[in-house]
Amino acid sequence: MPLSEHEQRLLDEMERNLYGHDADVTSTAFVGMPRPNYRAIVLGVLIALAGLGGLLAGVMTHMIVIGIVGFVLMFVGVLVAAKPGAPASPTDKKPRSAGSSFMQRMEQRWDERDGGRL
């Protein structure tokens, strides 16, 4: 069933608004978000696993002190793993030798699709 003229105009207007706002969203979406600190995550997970082992050992041997130390180690491990990394800035990006970035290539393909060339 074909769209009426009014529906077609509304659809075209919605598409124009989407294209106009899409570039703004993709260009500013990740600016200022902290990058994950993988070293801290791995270290935190290892400390938390050691703490879990200590907690289990304390429960199995009925030694409260070992269980408490294990729990504290687990807590410290989670805190270390959840430590935020350095904030990402636009200057941190390394230029690609291939030319354009992934997002630019995807935007170009989208524009080509919109133009009927793809």
Image (cartoon, rainbow, N blue to C red):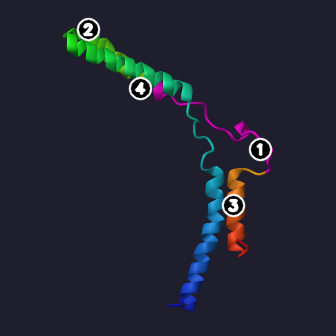
**Numbered tag placed on residue 78 in the rendering:** 4
4 up-or-down from 37: above or below = below
What secondary structure do most residues of the magenta stretch adopt?
A: loop
Where is residue 103 drawn, in percent x and y?
A: 68, 54
Structural distance between the alpha carbons of marks 2 and 3: 59 Å
Given the image, on which type of amino acid does mark 3 rest? Answer: Glu
Residue pictured at 34% horizontal, 16% vertical: 72
**Numbered tag placed on residue 107 in the rendering:** 3
Which residue in the rendered view is the most extreme toward the left? 62
Say which element carries label 2: helix
Structural distance between the alpha carbons of marks 4 and 2: 20 Å
**Region in magenta:** 80-99
Structural distance between the alpha carbons of marks 3 and 1: 17 Å
Residue pictured at 72% horizontal, 62% vertical: 108
Label whose residue precedes the other's in the sequence (4 or 2): 2
Say which element carries label 4: helix
Q: Is residue 73 left or right of residue 34?
A: left
Given the image, on which type of amino acid does mark 4 rest? Answer: Val
41 up-or-down from 90: above or below = above
Task: Reply yes or no: does residue 18 show up in magenta.
Answer: no
Label whose residue precedes the other's in the sequence (4 or 1): 4
Say which element carries label 1: loop
**Numbered tag placed on residue 79 in the rendering:** none
Structural distance between the alpha carbons of marks 4 and 1: 35 Å
Label whose residue precedes the other's in the sequence (2 or 3): 2
Residue pictured at 66% horizontal, 52% vertical: 27
**Mark 1 = which residue?**
96
**Mark 2 = which residue?**
65
Which quadrant, please, contains the C terminus? bottom right
